Image (cartoon, coloured by chain):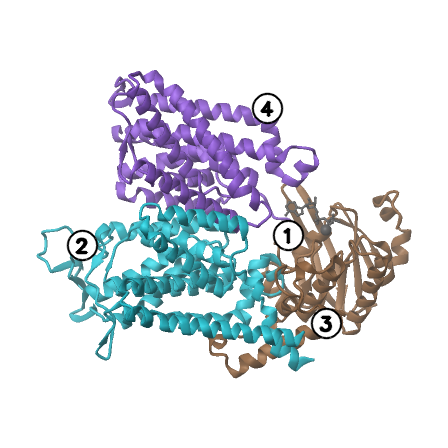
Chain colours: A purple, B brown, C cyan
Amino acid sequence: MELFAQQILNGLTIGAFYALIALGYTMVYGILKQINFAHGDLFMFGAYLGMTFLNMLIGAGLVSPWLIIPVCLASMLLVSALGLLLERAAYRPLRNAGRLPPIVSTLGAAIILQNAVMLLYEPRFRWYPEKISLPAWSLKIYSIQITFTQLLLLFLSFTFMTFLYLFIMKTKWGIAMRAVSLDINTAKLMGINVNKAIEITFIIGPALGAAGGIMVGLYYRQLIFTMGWNYGLKAFTAAILGGIGNVPGAVLGGIVLGLLESLSAGYIASCWKDAIAFFVLIIILLIRPQGILGEKIAEKI
Amino acid sequence: MHAQAILNIKNLTKSFGGVKAVDNIIMSIHENEMAGLIGPNGAGKTTIFNLITGIYVPDNGRIFLEDRDITGVKPHKITGLGISRTFQTIRLFKNLTALENVMSGAHNYSYSGLITSILRTRNQKKEEKMILNEAYKWLDFMNLADKSNELAKNLPYGIQRKLEIARALAARPKLLILDEPAAGLNETESNEIIKVFHKIREKGITILLIEHDMKVVMGSCSRIFVLDFGSLIAEGTPEEIQKNDKVIEAYLGQEI
Amino acid sequence: MQKKYSILKSKLAIAYLLTFILFLLLPIVLDYSNNPYWISIGVNYLIWIILGLAMNIALGYAGLFQLGQAGFYAVGAYVVAILNVKIFTFVIYGITFKIGGYSFFPSLLIALVISCIVGYLFSRPILRLRGDYLCIATIGLGEIIRYILTNDLINAPPGDYAPPMKILGTGKSLLIILDNPVGGLTGGPNGISGIARPEILGFTFDTPFKYYYLVMFFVLLVLFVMKRLENSRLGRAWTYIREDETAAQSMGVDIVHYKLLAFIISAGIAGIAGGLYAGRYTVISPAPDVFGFGASVLMFCIVVLGGIGSIPGVLVGSLGLVLLPEIFRSFPEARYLFVGIAMLLMMIFRPHGLIPGNMLSFNKKYCDACSSNT
Ligand SMILES: Nc1ncnc2c1ncn2[C@@H]1O[C@H](COP(=O)(O)OP(=O)(O)OP(=O)(O)O)[C@@H](O)[C@H]1O
Ligand SMILES: [Mg+2]
């Protein structure tokens, strides 16, 4: 029972990371019907930027956990600029080129990002500065430990997601994004600025990814330039699991995947957790290809 | 009047969500006739075609081709049994040539597989020649011989419609079903299509036609079925249909 | 018009012939100029050509959006390695027989069969998925294969039985013994080493130079098969499915059957490439960029960069992706950066690949038939 509760908690934490990254995939897919293979590396880049900024501030003699806030905002800003650049370079020229070319161009962008980070930061593990860490305070309920970090990360993830949800449902640009995702041509005819809606998608998604990167950095402390692939693949799986194109679905998918992983790590073997996650993904695709929350779209003939 | 039925539809029903797209339809198409299926937008015409060709499985009812029950049979098998079709929105193989498009019709009566194709046996070569001749024959039939090497996507709209008919004919159907073949065609093109219908019937092929262009329907069909909100509201000769009150009501204000 | 086609056809034939001669002479020139390193790059290039051609069947011909191909590549490599290095002894009701310890070529044949079977088993349940969903499912399956290899399914507890023998399964009627159990069946993360080099009638392919021609033989074999299929009822059925599944179905094409065939053939060819890889390096391990998602991505890119559905495209595409990192070897750190930049630029300026498939569209191949017909 203890193990179970502890694994549930771990699963929730990992799931919150996946969910934050999955949002970027699901938004791009919703609007362009394309998988953004560079998104995982944008997330990774965010994690590295956060580390750099923290180190810079420490170098300037500033040491306080509150620094995480400006650092996070700055990284989010820079990574969303990169996201915009990605849209301009890898998507916009290829908007009418069919399904496959944007996949290769984003894979190209992913390779560029990964190798650029490798060159800038050396091909080895890097660590988040020890001087800046969150309070070691932790909550004990019966025998389950909830650390402050976990609580904070969960809180932040859900705050971000709520804001995104409100943005998409309530604001003018959110509505424009939803219109474009329903039918890009009709949206254009209705006078919606399609390019702008797509750009906003490429600002928000990477920004959330960067936030996820910094949280992963603070939680695990350790970074490697290839981490974007693994997290990206998992987050994408989460997006599909929840129903791709669907924002609450991405959150739910992330959490389900996180729980699944930590439970299989706890009860089966941690070396099988990824394989089990993929196995469940395939089962879901077969019995409910539209995902948990996605709507079934029948092709009309 | 007691012509042999080639297609028998019995109590066919299909719903999507809450919408009964096809509701308890009974229809029978006679051998070598040209029948029309009309009705307002969303009446369920295309859905009936998709049920006949096995793309959808009916919720209820049976479909018989001659005496054979084809309900629930897979689409590719139904083609082999003798029904082929065109689509309301043209579905050609866009990046292939007109010739290759029509060659697809021969798929259901040719047999070469992996091994014979790799070994290029005598039979396989003979079969390839047969497929090619058949494809040219139908291209010729539709007056498209000079277009054989053009990519389908580069052909003008009217030609694409004709090419789709050529492709369906190459499958050697007993029953050809056409979903709005004259949609988007100009006056001369639709007159040409009407002539094509006669040519097809001379070959002993039965035609079932969906069409909104009443000139085409009235000018070529001997019997017409009228569908409204998924139900059959009338059936008869063009003259009967034009006088039918229910039909006039369904098409309220429109000229028939 | 016919004349134009026959000129084009003969030009194409000349191009193929020249390419063939170039491939044939390349190692001789390199050997003469004492450049063994580049010969092994050449071997690598040829193996990637086979992988690209395999991918081209699934993705280029049948339009199956497949990113798990590396799984079949791995299966081929591991079957060759296991059959070569390990020996299983079965004792069933007192009758003993052994499997394993085979030399390269019989193992390669079995690897072909097993990759095809794995291709069938893995694709059958997911066939009805379309587009991106199929893609994700294949990514998942490819990764599952890699985890199975990494986690080593058969890993009897150490110490119970003294090496080099381990009892895998025992019972009254059945006993299976695995000789050479170092690292169990697949060797876990370390993989399998000591794989014998291919040998036939006393001739061993032990240098890159010799190996080059062995792989080239298989490239030609695969090319031959693909050329024959491309222009056949089967090849056309694939392209119909790629263009429009619903229309293909309505023209009598059994899409399940043909998609399965595409998966199986593609898996079998990738399996052969895997076997050749094992025989070349004599060591294999389940690294993600060798047998994992990274490798699948590379195969995918070879096809798209070269030109979807185009055989010359595969030759050029794999040349780019295998040679580019080598050309920039003098900047060892940054070389994949250039690969990424090249991929991005290529797609922006030539989204349909270097040699698009329909530049050499099938219609030109019917020129003989046209002239005999009219
Ligand atoms: N795949 C599907 N999923 C959900 N609803 C469908 C589907 N196919 C058809 N329908 C619905 O069934 C009804 C009948 O549609 P159908 O396409 O058969 O009409 P139709 O008579 O061919 O109309 P039109 O003249 O516009 O082609 C419509 O309400 C349509 O929205
Ligand atoms: Mg219709």
Ligand 2 is within 8 Å of the C-beta of the residue at disc 3: no
* Of the pair A201 and A56, the residue shown nearer to us: A56
Q: Is residue A121 visible?
A: yes
Q: Which residue is mark 2?
A: C183
Amino acid at the residue labelled 4: Thr
Up the image or down, A238 lies above or below B203; here it is above
Marks 1,3: beta carbons within 8 A:
no
Q: Residue at x 31, y 68 (%)?
A: C30
Q: Is residue C224 left or right of residue C275?
A: right
Q: Which residue is mark 4?
A: A171
- Quadrant where the N terminus of chain A sits is top left
* Of the pair C323 and B209, the residue shown nearer to us: C323
Q: Is residue B138 left or right of residue C159?
A: right
Q: Nearer the viewer, mark 3 or mark 2?
A: 3
Q: Nearer the viewer, mark 2 or mark 4?
A: 4
Q: Which residue is mark 1?
A: B60
Q: Residue at x 58, y 68 (%)?
A: C362
Q: Residues within 10 Å of mark 2 (few under 14, many from 20)?
A: some
The lab-note entry on whether marks 4 and 3 share a chain reads no
Q: Residues within 10 Å of mark 3 (few under 14, many from 20)?
A: some
Q: Which residue is mark 3?
A: B145
* Of the pair C348 and A257, the residue shown nearer to us: C348
Between the C-alphas of marks 2 and 1, the distance is 59 Å
Q: Residues within 10 Å of mark 4 (few under 14, many from 20)?
A: few
Q: Secondary structure at mark 1?
A: strand
Between the C-alphas of marks 1 and 3, the distance is 43 Å
